[in-house]
Image (cartoon, grey):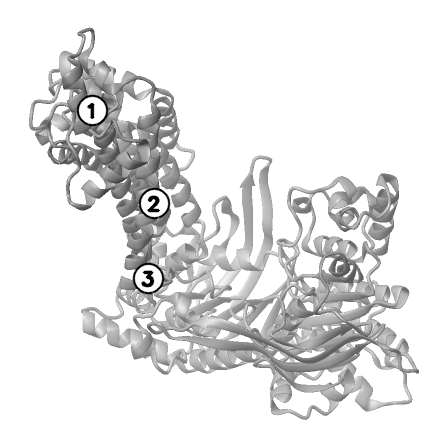
Amino acid sequence: MSDPTTTAGAVRPLLEIKNLEVGFQTTDGIVPAVRGVDLTLMPGQTLAIVGESGSGKSTTAHAIINLLPGPGRITGGSILFDGEDLTKYSPKKMEEVRGRQIGFVPQDPMSNLNPVWSVGFQVEETIRANGIASGRKEVRAHAIQVLKEAGLADADKRLKQFPHQFSGGMRQRVLIGIGLSSRPKLLIADEPTSALDVTVQRRILDHLETLTRDIGTAVLFITHDLGLAAERAEQLVVMYKGKIVEAGPSKDILQNPVHPYTQRLVAAAPSLASRRIISATQQSATHSLGDLAYAPTTVTDGLDLIAAAEERIEHQPAVKRPDAIVVKDLTKVYKIRGQGKGSSGELIASDKVSFAVEKGTTTALVGESGSGKSTVAKMILRLEDPTSGSILIDGEDVAPLKGRALLSLRRRMQPVFQDPYGSLDPLRNIGNTIAEPLQVHKVGDRTERRDRVLELLDQVALPQSLITRYPNELSGGQRQRVAIARALALKPDIVVLDEAVSALDVLVQAQILKLLADLQSELELTYLFITHDLAVVRVIADNVCVMQKGRIVEAATTDQVFDSPQEQYTKELLNAIPGAGITLGV
Amino acid sequence: MAGYILRRLLQAIPVLLGTTFLIYFMVFAMPGDPLLALFGDKTPNPALLEQLRQQYHLDQPFIVQYFLYLGGIFRGDFGTSFSGEPVADILARTFPVTIRLAIMALIIEFVGGVLIGLVSGLRKGKLFDASALVVSLIFISLPIFVIAFVAQFIFGIQLGWARTTVSTGAPIQDLILPAFVLASITFAQLIRLTRASVIETQSLDFVRTAYSKGLSRRRIIPVHILRNSLIPVVTYAATDFGVLLVGATVTEGIFNVPGVGRTLYQAIIRGEGPTVVSFVTVMVLIYLVVNLVVDLLYGLLDPRIRYVK
C-alpha cells in the first residue's frame, strides 16, 4: 500500500496525499484543521484546491513542505512525493526538497519579499542555496534569466532595486521567478494573485501557465475563487472545514456540482453568476431570470446572486428621480516627491470626473488600484478636499460647508470600508460601536440609542446578543454587518461602500450583497459602490462608471456595459473576470 | 542626503541656544552666593571678593552675564573655573574619559543584549528565555549603586580580577568593570526589545518564504531574522548613549573615574555657571549628533527610509 509501484505504462503520481490530518496545538488540546485529505497529482498536471478561508486549503499546502505555522503539526497520514513519504523526512532533508524539488509561490506579494534586501539578492540566494549555479557571475546571470522568464524584461537593470520600488504585480513575478528558479517538479501556488487587480492577475497566470508547461512542472493551485480554479486547472478539489467535499475534473464540478456546499459555491461565485446573468438576459426577454437560472433554490438558502440581481431589475424605478449626488469636473492633484534628486511632480488622482447618482439607485465606480476611484469617494465624503470641481448632494454644493453644516452633511452620508478587521475599534463592544454615531450627533437618550442599536442589529440580520461582544469574537462577515449597521445608525440617505465586500469569502460576499439590496429597497438608500471587481457590479449596480488613470472612460447602465462595452479598457476588464470561457450548465 | 544633514545641523543651533540659556538661568537662580561659599567658614577680604566678582562678571545682571559668556564661546573661550583653570582644559581632560567609558558600556550592552535577546526570541518560552527574563528583571529592579558596590566587592576585593578604583589616565582595562556596571542599566531593556523584535520578525511572511526557497535555518537566522530585527534595536541602543553619559555620574563617583560626572557634580555644588553650562552644552551637542547618526543609521538599515530635504 505504501509502495506505489509503477507497472509498465502507468505513470507514478508525483504527489499523493493519503488521509492527511493536521492539527493546531492550543491550550485546550489539538484543534484539527485538516481532516483526512486524500489527493493525487500526476506529473505536469495542474490541480486546484478551492475553499473559503479556514477550509484548510492553505494548511494542506504548507503541510506538504513542512512549513506549518508555529503550533501546527501533522497528526496522521502520509504525503508521498515521487514515492517518498515527506512526513518522515528530517528537517535537514526537507531543506533539500524545498526550493529544489518543490517551489512555492506565496499569497501576498507585498509581505513575502524581505524589505531590507535587494530583489537581486533574494533571487541570488535562492539560486546559491539550491546549487543551481555558483560563482558570482554565473549566479547573477542565472538570476537575470529567471526574472526575465518570469516576465521582468528589464531584470538586469532592476536587480539592485528593493522590493518597495516594485509594483505588486512585479513583485509577484519576482516570487514566481524564485519559485521556479530551480525547475522544480512541483510548484505550490498559494492564492498567487488574490492581492492583485484582475487584469494583472490574468496576465500573470497566463504567463505562469506557459512557463510551467514549458518546464513540465506540476502545479498545486490554491484559491478561493471557483471560476479562477476551473479556468486554470484540469482537476478540482473542493475543501470545506478541513475535509474534501468534492473532487474531479473542473468542468464536471462546475456544470454538475453534487455536494450541497459546492452547489452553494457555484451559485454564489460572482464571476460565475455574472456570466449566467449575461447569458440569461441574452437568451430571452420573454422568460424571467428566475426560470432560466440554474435551479439551486433548495440548497442556496436565498444566497443565489441571480435572485438578488433579479430583485434589482424588478425594483428599477419607472420614473426618473432627482439626483442624490452630482459630481462635476472633480479634480484632485497630489504633489509627489520624485525618484531622483530634488525632482518632484504631480499626480492627477482624479481628472475632471463627472457623474450623477439618482436617488435610490446604485452607481458603481470600477477600476484597478490607482485608478482614482477611492480618491473620488473620499472627496464626496469630504475626507479629502478637491483641487477643483464641485460636488452637489441633493442639489446643495458641499464645498463651502464647515463645522455644524458639515456635521449634518456627514449625518446624511455614511461610509462602509473594505477591511472589516481594521474598521472596527477592537476595544469597543458592538453596541457601543453602532451607537457611536448617535452619540456624536447627540441623537436620543441612552435607552433610545439602545433601542435603535437593537433595531439595527435586526436590520442587518445579527442576533441582538452580539451587543456586548467585541469585534475579535466575530467573523469577517459579521464584522462587515456591524460596519453596515453603524453606517445606517443615523438613517443616512447615501451610503458610500468602498470595496465593502472585497475582503470577504464568496458565500459571505453573496449574503452581504443580498443584505445591501434588501436594505436599499426597504430604506430607499442611494449607494455609491466602489470596487475593482466587475463581477460584483453586475449583481448590485444600476449604473457603472469605469475609471482608468483618474478618468472615467466609460459610463452607462450596467446592462449596457456588460452587453456592449464600448471602450477597449472595459472589454479587457470584462475578459479578465475569471471563468469567462467556461460553459456553465445554464 | 547632504541637504538633510545640513538642515539637521542648523536645527541644532536654536536647541543649543535654548538649553544654554535655561541652564545658565537655573545656575543663576540657585540660592546662595557662590563666591562666599568658596571661602567657607573664613571671612573673605572684601577687596578680593570684589575683584573676583568683577572677574566672573557676577556683579552684572543675569542677561549681561549670559551674553558675555555666549560671546566668549564664539571666540573659543569657555571661561575659567573658580580654581583658575580654563573650562576648555577641564572639558578636554574629562570628556574623553567619560566618552570612552560610555562607548565601552554601549558595546557591552549591544553585543550582550542582542545575543541574549536573539537566543531568547528564537527559544521563546524555553529555559534559556525564562532565565534571561528573571535575570534581566533583577537588574532592572536594582539601583545602579547597589550593582556597583556588589561588583566592586566581588570582582575587585573577593576575586581580585579588577581594581576597585580607576587610576589616573583611566586606562581601558581599569574601565572594564565600571563599563559593565554602567551597561547594566540599559542592558535588560535591550534584551527585552531584541527578543520582542525577533519574535515578531520570525512570524513574518518573508521568513516563511525564505524557508520555502530552500534556505537553511543557519542562513535565515542572521540574514532574514536578525538583520530585520535590528532596525528598532539599533535605534534604541544609540539613543542609550545619552542615558549612559548621564548614568556615568554615579558610576564615576563610585569607581573614582576622573570623568565628566564628578567634575560636573562639583561645579553644580559650587554654582560655577560657566563650567556647568559648558559641560551641559557639550553633552547636548553630543546628544544631538548621536541622534543625527541614529537617523542616518536608520536609513542605512532600512532602504525604505528616504530623507526629506
Look at the image and tell me whether residue B58 can be seen: yes
Q: Chain of mark 1?
A: B
> Left or right of B224: which side holds B99?
left
Report x, y in % for residue A373. 63, 74
Q: Secondary structure at mark 2?
A: helix
Q: Does the residue at mark 2 contact the one at mark 1 (Cβ under 8 Å)?
A: no
Nearer the camera: disc 3 or disc 2 = 2
Task: Where is residue A323? Give x, y as percent.
Answer: 83, 77
| Residue A154 percent across, percent down from the top left | 34, 81
Residue shown at 35% from the left, 57% from the top: B302
Between disc 2 and disc 1, whose residue precedes? 2
Element at badge 1? helix
Q: Which residue is mark 3?
A: A117
> Which residue reaches farthest front?
B47
**In front here: A41 or A108?**
A108
Relative horizontal placement of residue A551, taking residue B178 as reference (left or right): right
- Which residue is identified by label 1? B53
The disc at residue B15 is: 2
The chain ID associated with circle 3 is A
